[in-house]
Amino acid sequence: MKFKARPVRVAALVKEEIAKLLTKGIKDPRIGFVSVMDVRMSNDLRYANVYVSLFGTESERTSSLVGLRHSAGWIRREVGKHLHIRVTPEIRFFADDTLDKVYQLEEVFEEIHEEQKHRPMLHLSLEDTVAALREGNVFYLTCHENPDGDAIGSMLALRFLLHGLGKTQVVCAMADPVPAIYRELPGANTIVNADVPPPDYDVAVLLDCGQLNRIGDIADHIAADKQLLIVDHHLEDGEPGASGFIDASYASTGEIVATLFETADVSLSQETAVCLYAAVATDTGCFRFSNTTARTHRIAAKLLDTGIDAHHWNKRLFSSMSRVKFELMRRLLQRVAFHADGRVAISWVTEEDLQTLDAHPEDVENLINYWQNVESVSVAILCKSFQPDSTRVSFRSDASFDSAAFLRQFGGGGHAPAAGATLDMPLEQAKTVLLEALEQALA
């Protein structure tokens, strides 16, 4: 109901203003006596279908409708002076005797749209993905909530690819602020949040995730009638009705974007290479995780060939630690508990911990790796309780356990060695449920 309320209000205003213009008389001799019967707005407020009663002979009625349609641009400008919305809708006139037919058509279009929403994602090749990028003009790029290096790095790198393809109107947006360790990445200062209205884009791109429910408040800016393209490496289905490239054989979305550069025959700048290096290195644990492949190293070599300072970025991404993060790490390590004969190690962090230490959620990043490195541990878990009845969990595992497959029962996903989920339950309950399920899975 909320979704429909605004179009109805705007339609009433448009109807009122056009009726006033017709009462005053539009300076077009073709327009005779006309009465506005109804105005229907599109859900995105970009079109106003105005239904009018036309009087006189058939010839006079036709003449009036032609005159109205020719005056639509001027009427739009006049109406726009009284509407307090970002974009004045395009005015389209219809004779009221076609209302029933138009409504029937709209119902058909709605049914088609519903079918499209439930249509499986169309999987594209790398070449087709580049072709889709070439065809677009204005782009809106985004990634998942709680963004990591792969999400941010691949999004910024795709922005540079689009610039290389001659696209000048590219906006990057995320639901959450850029974590401190990624703020030096080229272009990171251009990323906007959900409070900034999107441009009038024709292509939206989801990076490092395939579902709109993963991008937070930014999902409100993804219009149903716009092209949705997905570039991702997670083993999960893409958003129904979208198209794109998803391949879990890639260690990171950054690897896919790097391959798109090659496919598009666009050269890598140092700025682009830095963003891609952050993406590839963070999702492979600085090339230590089991998802690292020969392709990963070949791509990394190409990035290094551009002359980027890998030492600087490795230190910033993996070695630098603030005093606050150190104190947080010490607290979490003291809580680590071992289960399942030492195969499972679990710790947790709460909102109270963050407030006490004056820390931020981003300070928790990668701390799980410390108890994952314990010799007997196959599965490391970090539970994050930042809201009373919700617990976010992160998993890290060795090759003997598929974290993503395990967490699907809780609505989560990710990679086999690294995955996450949100459980709608308090911290202690979430820990109990997870550990019981893990005992069974490992047995």
Image (spheres, rainbow, N blue to C red):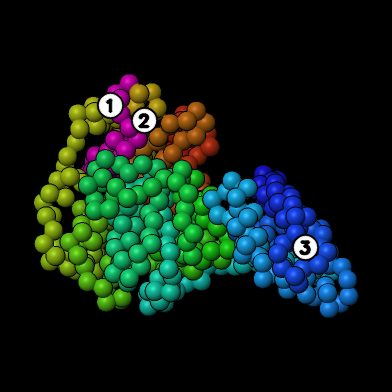
Distance between mark 2 and mark 3 Cα atoms: 59 Å
- Asked if disc 2 and disc 3 are in contact, CB closer than 8 Å, the reply is no
Start-end of magenta stretch: 356-378
Amino acid carrying label 1: it is Arg
Amino acid carrying label 2: it is Val
Classify mark 1: residues with Cα within 10 Å, few (<14), some (14-19) or many (20+). some
Q: Residue 51 shows which numbered tag?
A: 3
Amino acid carrying label 3: it is Tyr
Name which of mark 1 and mark 3 comes first in the sequence: 3
Point out residue 156 in the picture as x, y percentages from the top left corner.
31, 57
- Asked if disc 1 and disc 3 are in contact, CB closer than 8 Å, the reply is no
Classify mark 3: residues with Cα within 10 Å, few (<14), some (14-19) or many (20+). many
The front one of 180 and 225 is: 225
Say whether residue 225 is left or right of residue 209.
right
- Relative vertical location of residue 102 with respect to residue 395 in this rendering, above or below: below
Identify the residue under disc 2: 349
The front one of 62 and 119 is: 62
Point out residue 424 in the picture as x, y percentages from the top left corner.
53, 37
Point out residue 51 in the picture as x, y percentages from the top left corner.
77, 63
- Asked if disc 2 and disc 1 are in contact, CB closer than 8 Å, the reply is yes
Identify the residue under disc 1: 331
